[in-house]
Image: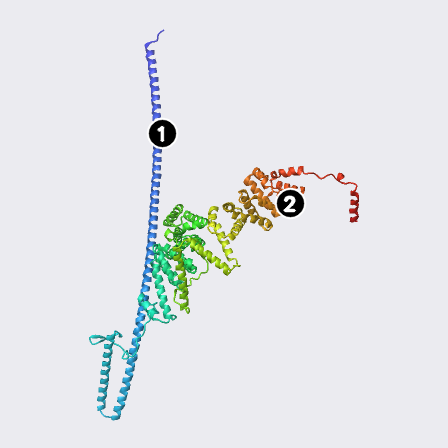
Amino acid sequence: MSESPPMKETRHALSDKSSDSENDHVRHTDHDRRKERRRDADADHKRIVIERRRSDAAHDHQRDSDHHRRQDRGHDRRREHDRNRDRDRKESHEQGWRGDQHRKDDHKHNRREGRSEGHRDENSRRDDHKNDRDRNQRDEQKDHQRDDRRDDRRGDSRGDRRRDDRREDRRGDRRDDERLSDLRTDQSGRGGREEPVGHKRVRKSSPDAEAEPPRKKDVITGRTGGAYIPPARLRMMQQQITDKSSVEYQRIAWEALKKSINGLVNKANVGNIDVIIKELMRENLVRGRGLLCRTIMTAQAASPTFTHVYAALVAVINTRFPQTGELILKRLVIQFRRSFRRNDKLTCMASVRFIAHLLNQQVAHEVLALEILTLLLGNSTDDSVEVAVAFLKECGMKLTELTPKGVHAIFERLRSILHEANLDKRVQYMIEVMFAIRKDGFSAHPSVVKELELVEEESQYTHLLALDDTLDGEDMLNVFKFDPEFAENEERYAEIAKDILGSDDEGEGSGGDDSDDEEEEEEEQAEGNGEIIDNTETNLVALRRTIYLTIQSSLNFEECAHKLLKLELKPGQVGEMCHMILDCCAQQRTYEKFFGLLAQRFCQLKKDYAEPFEQIFLSSYDTIHRFETNKLRNVAKFFAHLLFTDAIPWNVLSHIKLTEDDTTSSSRIFIKILFQELCEYMGLPKLNERIKDPTLQDAFEGLFPRDLPKNTRFAINFFTSIGLGGLTADLREHLKSAPKPAPVSDTIAAPAAPAKKEVYFIKQ
């Protein structure tokens, strides 16, 4: 049955409507989805914009803060630069003002002194003229009174006229006398001050100028220290004085000595220093040592670049006159202390520079240099560190040779100052440059140039002065002082100068063999005449002190051995050096291998050094009970090192008897530490082989006794207790194989009964 057409159209219409509604629903759903996506995209865009704005704001803030920070750093640098510039300007202005003030004061002083001389002469002339004028007035008043009395007696008017005429005649005569005296004064070149007469200026002098002798002006003993006198005139004045013991002659000689020393010192340089030294030796340096020291210090302060020349000059003079070298060193120390207290940088720099070069020439001791550096770097400032660096540049190489440990401590202090960064950049850079110079081995700053090596180390006198000692500069030696024995002292110094210059000439012309022969002849003569024996042991104390300082100032044992060999010890002093090495080792808190290596080096160099150490071992073991525990341990380790290295023979052990009766607690501790150290060095097998060596059985006979079982057991127990029981294997075998005593039943026989009774009877 088929459907009718209207029904089909209705169904088609319904299907069309449903499809349209589905399309509308899909369309609406897509639209909503697009709206949500658009809304989400807008939200993401807004979030991105906000984050971008925040990042831009943070970037702008960081940029502004960096800009402000850079500006602040720039302002700080500019302010620091301005402060440094103002400080430098102020210091230079103050220095210039001080220099100008000193020059003005000196100029005023000289003008004042010159005016005082002129004023004294002018005042003397004024006084003479005033006295003459007063005397003339008194004479004139007396004449007037006499004329008045005469006229009063006559009583007429003619007396007045005659009185006036006589007065006019006297005035005219007085004027004529004054003109005549002025003419004579002009002809003789002498006169007083000028006074106007009419339109001309004439010189006025006293009427009695011819009668009084001219005053003799002393040009040497003046108030200003004396005027300049040419050397030729000075010699002529000196020759005119017949009395050579007079004050005038000695003063002229003093002025000549001062001029000569000043001229010679100012002419010294590297090329002519030999000639200058010979010329200076001809002058009386004993009398003028104060002048010499003052002149050298003044010249060095004026020309710091010639400090090494003046130091070489002082070093040569110090070999002949040690008092002069000590005096100039004292004055330098006093000058340094004074300038350090006053913050006078220039004077302080000049003083430490001179002291450094005197240290290079071995006139000053290295202890003084270390004290100066410690003082300068204690409370470090820009100026003190700068002075310390300049001082180290000059004497760093010599200090490194003499006391490496001290130099290391000084550089560690400089390193800590550099790390603190409290100083100026310029001073920090100077410290860095100082470390570079040290790394280079001070090659650019040698201690002594080759041309100025004029003194041998053996003939130099080294003065040990401390920075806090009470020193006397002896300033009175700078001024003239009358010498009652002037002629005798001059002759005595002439003989000394002749000997010095003669010995120098002979040393240059002859070889070393002649000088050695002369010394041998002088020693033979001294022995024939009788030698003076020093019972105060001053030389021994000085030797021990020198050895101790050498050991303490050495960086390693090789350097120490080299320095000690350069001392050229006499045969009787070798044992003293060996004792000193052992004493220094014993005084340490713990044992240092440095001393064992040092003694080993000496023993292996020469047999003469091994024998004293053998004797020291024997004497030390005999007196071991007097040693403290720490000292005993160091001595035992010291000799263990010498035995292990075969520096001393093992036969010295034959002196030891290891028994209960022959040993004490100290000696047993000594043996224990000795063998424990040997076992540590050699190892137990090698030590056991050494003990079993057939050639050394005599040496170990006392240590490993086999005479009595009691002693053998004691030795076995001793070595076992100290952990060296492996050394007693032979002793144990010997103890086992030794014949044992027979039993008591076998040894007692019938005849022995009466003896037993006898013993019993005696006991009763």
Residue 122 to residue 436: above or below: below
Residue 17: x and y, percent? 33, 17
Q: Is residue 194 left or right of residue 682?
A: left
Residue 314, can we see it? no
Residue 757 to residue 304: above or below: above
Viewer-closest of 349 and 199: 349
- Marks 1 and 2, the one that precedes in the sequence: 1
Q: Tell me the quarter of the image containing the N terminus.
A: top left
Please tell me which residue is depicted at 35% across the width and 48% down the height of the picture: 76
Amino acid at pointer 1: Asp
Q: Is residue 153 left or right of residue 586?
A: left
Viewer-closest of 316 and 192: 316
Residue 536: x and y, percent? 53, 59
Residue 529 to residue 160: above or below: above
Residue 324: x and y, percent? 41, 60
Residue 160 to residue 674: above or below: below
Q: Quadrant of residue 519?
A: bottom left
Name the colouring of the figure: rainbow
Q: Is residue 666 left or right of residue 332?
A: right
Q: Mark 1 or 2, which is nearer the eye?
A: 2
Residue 720: x and y, percent? 62, 40
| Number of numbered markers | 2
Amino acid at pointer 2: Thr
Secondary structure beneath disc 1? helix
- Which of the numbered marks, if any, corresponds to residue 659? 2
Viewer-closest of 461 and 349: 461
Q: Give the residue furthest to the top.
A: 1
- Which of the numbered marks, if any, corresponds to residue 40? 1
Q: Residues within 10 Å of mark 2 (few under 14, many from 20)?
A: many
Q: Residues within 10 Å of mark 1 (few under 14, many from 20)?
A: few
